[in-house]
Amino acid sequence: MNLTVTTYAFYLLLAIALTIWVARTLHRNGRIFLVDCFHGNEELADSVNHLLVVGFYLINIGFVSLYLKLNHEVGAVQGVFEALSGKMGIVLLVLGAMHFFNLFVFTRLRRRAELERSGPPVMPKGRRIAKEGQA
């Protein structure tokens, strides 16, 4: 087995392990937000949480697979580490971006649920809305 194939093996092992770790962390900690967003409906929150994790796996493992190929042969052990650091750096940036995207989505869902619970805004008593042209 040459060093390029060894680099591929290490890359896949590391990238998929990190993807699994991030997905499990998002699944475990995202549940609380989703239960709140769905007004305590735990069954719906768990279902959506699972679907989000499946999508996360598909996108990230698909990216890792597409990004596998090296543009050059790895000729020495130093090249293995250099190739792995470059590839894993990109994978980590993509995982981080996906993580922040998920946080953004969870925050939007939670904000929407809070607005639905509180109802429409109410004008304070004793205040009138000025008609156009009046001060």
Image (cartoon, grey):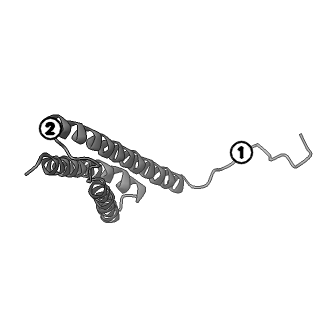
Question: Dot 2, crowdedness within 10 Å: few (<14), some or many (≥20)?
Answer: few
What residue do we see at 34% from left, 65% from top?
A: 44
Residue 45: image location, x then y, percent: 34, 61
Task: Give the image quarter of residue 79.
Answer: top left
From the viewer's side, name the closer residue of 76 and 47.
Answer: 76
State the image quarter where residue 49 is shown. bottom left
- The image shows residue 55, relative to residue 114, as above or below, that is below
Q: Quadrant of the C terminus?
A: top right
Q: Is residue 60 left or right of residue 112?
A: left
Q: Is residue 6 left or right of residue 127?
A: left
Secondary structure at numbered mark 1: loop
The spot of residue 109 in percent (x, y) is 46, 54
Tell me the CA gap for discs 1 and 2: 77 Å
Residue type at mark 2 is Ala
> Quick one: label 1, few (<14), some, or many (20+) residues within 10 Å?
few
Q: Which residue is mark 1?
A: 125
